[in-house]
Amino acid sequence: MKALACTAPLQALDDNKGSLRWADAEIYQLAEVALHTIDQVTVSMDFDSGADQDRVLSQTARFVALQAPARSDDEHHKIALHVLQRLINVGTVDRSFSQVYGTVDSNGVYQRFTFEFNLLVERAGSDNRIYLRATDEAINVLVGALDTDVQSAQIAAEVKLENLIKRGRLAEAKMAAEQARYRTVQYGEMLRQLLEATTRNVRAVDWEHEVPLLLGDALDHIEQRYNAEHHILTNISEARDQSDDEQHKQRAAELVVIVRDCIRRHMQLQKRLLTAGELFRSEQDRQQFVEPPRTATIDLHGQLLTPMLGLPIRDAVELGTSFFRDAGGLKRTSALSLPSFVTRLLRPAPERQRLGSEIPEPEIQRAEDHAPFSVDDWNTTDALLSLHRRPRRLSRLLAEAEEISPATAALLLHRAVHAFSPQIGQHIDRGDPHALIAVRTGDEFDTPRFGGDDLLLQIALLGPPDDADSHDTDGLADEETPS
């Protein structure tokens, strides 16, 4: 099912070509156009960049023109663009094809899975330009060998190529040479994806066991292929020079170009392999010591409200309206459907009174102010939280507050939790000389009334220390401070 899924998008092009309203596409073989497009992208792919989309469209449009020379050039270009967009799968969210398949497990239960794949993808190159790249599935469809080991397939293709050259069957040798080049591109793409994954997250790639073994095998493979391809190139040159047939010479010359391109790609791949270790070390240092991303937050009091209070009303209203319109997000508009619209039109109008209904007389009662905490509770917690010299744990402060009164302990807990993420900007705007700071100790506490993460409380100075806070505290050992 996976093998059929990779070819399904190409077959769907011919199955659905009758639905194209802007052209009579029955004359075109769109699956062949798709294969030609994949071929152009694969051959144009490089290690750092891919295929230029405009160039691929231009070359594919020439192939389309051969199928229908009587049609216009504009139609040929539209057909080429249509096929290219279907191979990229433009119009979907993730631009992936999917196929549902099933397997029977060891218990005899049939389970369904989803196989997702791409044929052509758009990727940014080193020069920040968007290029086209062919995936492994697309190259496998092109060579007609699905789920084949890349290294073994390329060796087999080059052995087949050398054998065909020795037997003088250059027409078949050209096809074998093109297949070997496809495998070269596929092998380089596999290693490029490995290095690209390293630049994104070095932990996602096994550089301890898997990658060194893969890089060593790749270097050995390139050395063997380099010698084999030079031997093949020598045999092709001899076959070209010894032949008197012009067609034979032309095919041999085309083989020379293809094999030289394979040698060039192997040399480029070898250069990347030799610098892969340096890339890993540099990415490891960069990703390990990079600073965490910082997100800027807006202080509504200090950055919006305070400046607005000094503006004229007209400017302040315009500024506030602009901020809250952008901060509130999009407004969903209600769409009226035809059935609901007709229902509203047919609904009888309600009877209206000119003066309206009688307004009831409201009953107003004076609300009594009940402060949840008394002044004594605040003074007591102020004394407990006077931590200028040494920090203290919340659990021990709560134990002392419980001995005084339950309300004092509750107020102390509220102030400690509020100090876990204090608004430093508000304290500075108010001119506070210090602020209460709370951090987690990593321990937990559990009492009959309270429980949770234990906090370490300390007073942080927000300005120059005064005489009371400038004493030397080196001699004060705090047994409560965690190591």
Image: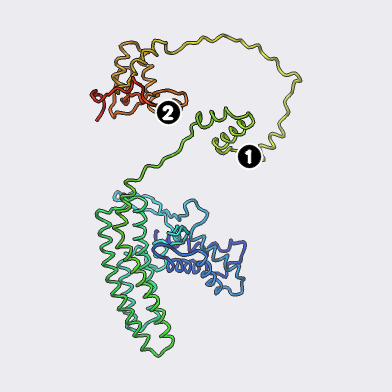
- Element class at badge 1: loop
- Amino acid at the residue labelled 2: Ile
Residue picked out by circle 1: 335
Q: Earlier in the sequence, mark 1 or mark 2?
A: 1
Q: Quadrant of residue 253?
A: bottom left
Across and down, in percent, residue 170 comes to: 38, 81
Above or below, 432 against 139 in this view is above
472 and 12: which is toward the camera: 472
Residue 350 vertical position relative to residue 373 in the rendered view, above or below: below
Comparing labels 1 and 2, the label whose residue is closer to the camera? 2
Work out whether residue 404 or residue 154 is closer to the camera in this orientation and state it: 404
Residue farthest bottom in this picture: 244
Q: Nearer the viewer, residue 199 or 182?
A: 199
The residue identified by callout 2 is 424
Q: Is residue 350 visible?
A: yes
Find residue 111 and report its horizontal and vertical position in percent.
36, 49
Give yes or no for contact between labels 1 and 2 (Cβ–Cβ under 8 Å): no
